[in-house]
Amino acid sequence: MKITIEAVVKAPLARVWESWTTPADIMAWNAASDDWHTTASTVDLRNGGAFSSRMEAKDGAMGFDFGGNYTRVEPMSLIEASFGDRGMTVEFSETADGVRVRETFDAEEQNSVEMQKAGWQAILDNFKRHTEA
């Protein structure tokens, strides 16, 4: 099953792209709630390149690594990636209101679709706030 989320970011396309693909920026926005944070991020933004983020609870109770490989990169337009047996597509398109960022990803089986959608949307909303600031 595919899940799609999106946000319109009021910032220039170059800034939106940079915020999505720069480790320092990713560490600033990549969390679904205030009690989590990203402590490390790497990006090798090219077809076949790897990406990873270390996400941890701020109280140190738990953490996990999230990573995969880019399968298709079209600068300022599209990123496709795989992580495990799942895939993700991120589209960047300019609109009259800003840059629409649309993420479509394969759902996992451990958590409900609603929970996954809410978590990924929360992260995308953090991305929007960070990029617009």
Image: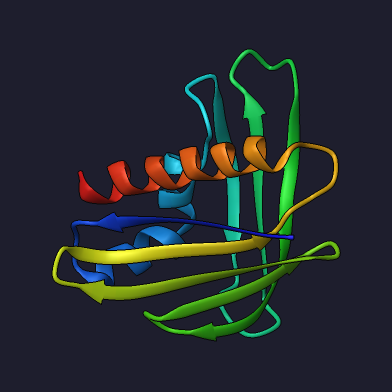
Query: Residue 45 falls in which quadrant of the image?
Result: bottom right
Nearer to the camera, 26 or 95: 95
Q: Residue at x 55, y 37 (%)?
A: 118
Placement of the C terminus among the 4 image quadrants: top left
**With 93 as the anchor, is 104 left or right in this view?**
right
Residue at the spot x=47%, y=50% of the render?
26
**Residue 44 coordinates in the image, percent (x, y):** 60, 72
Tell me how many marks there are: 0
Q: Quadrant of residue 99?
A: bottom left
Q: How is the image coloured?
A: rainbow
Q: Residue at x 71, y 82 (%)?
A: 48
* Residue 57, position as x, y percentages in the image: 64, 22
| Residue 102 against residue 27 in the figure, above or below | below
Residue at image position (47%, 22%) is: 34
| Of residues 14 and 10, the one drawn nearer to the viewer in this rendering | 10
As drawn, is 117 to the left or to the right of 21?
Answer: right
Could you say where residue 43 lies in the image, as x and y percent from the top left? 58, 65
Is 89 placed left or right of 29 in the picture?
right
Quarter the N terminus occupies: bottom right
- Is residue 103 or residue 43 the one in the foreground? 103
* Percent position of residue 40, x then y: 60, 44
